Image: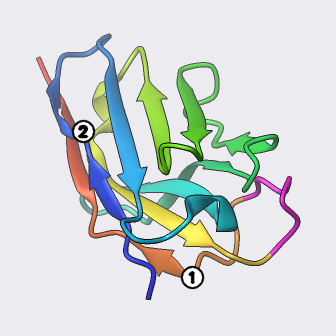
Amino acid sequence: QLQLVESGGGLVQPGGSLSLSCTAPGFKMDDYAIGWFRQAPGKEREEVSCISKRGLGAKYGDSVKGRFVISRDNDMNTVTLQMNSLKLEDTAVYYCAARSRGHPDDGRCYGMESWGKGVLVTVSS
């Protein structure tokens, strides 16, 4: 079964940047569309960004558009979420998720089949 591992979380000041990575040891990540989701305390899970298998399609949630960038390096088997201009409300546990179905260029956030354990991002002064 696909296992996803997130890394890169931590504490950052408002306005700062942080980069999250998602890997899948032992699996070819280009077989999967990958998404980042987040859940803040007391709130529902929110779509952050997703990227297609070939990296040609990507989607962003409205709250992160223009600030976050998702990318993937299939040779390195890694998907990265670069988070810039971070705000207090970006504080959450961030989860990496994967979808095997769908067109290779479909970067929408749906039908995720596997999930990582999550990594905490705290934005605080």
Task: Look at mark 2 in the image and give the residue it sits on.
Answer: 8
* Left or right side of 99 for 67: left
Mark 2 falls on what kind of element? loop
Q: Earlier in the sequence, mark 2 or mark 1?
A: 2
Q: Residue at x 32, y 10 (%)?
A: 15
Q: Residue at x 27, y 40 (%)?
A: 91
Q: Amino acid at mark 2?
A: Gly
* Left or right side of 51 for 72: left
The CA span between labels 2 and 1 is 22 Å
Nearest the camera: 52 or 11? 52
Residue furthest out toward the bottom: 1
Q: Quadrant of residue 122?
A: top left
Quadrant in the picture for the C terminus: top left
Residue furthest out toward the top: 15
Where residue 14 sits: x, y (%)? 26, 15
In the image, the segment drawn in magenta is 102-108
Where residue 32 sits: x, y (%)? 65, 66
Where residue 50 sits: x, y (%)? 64, 50
Tell whether label 1 touches label 2 (CB within 8 Å). no
Task: Look at mark 1 in the image and give the residue it sits on.
Answer: 113
Q: Amino acid at mark 1?
A: Glu
Numbered circle sitting on residue 97: none
- Picture mark count: 2
Colour theme: rainbow
Q: Residue at x 50, y 66 (%)?
A: 97
Where residue 12 sits: x, y (%)? 18, 22
* Left or right side of 59 for 12: left
Nearest the camera: 78 or 41? 78
Instruction: Check residue 78 for magenta coloring.
Output: no
Q: Residue at x 42, y 26 (%)?
A: 83
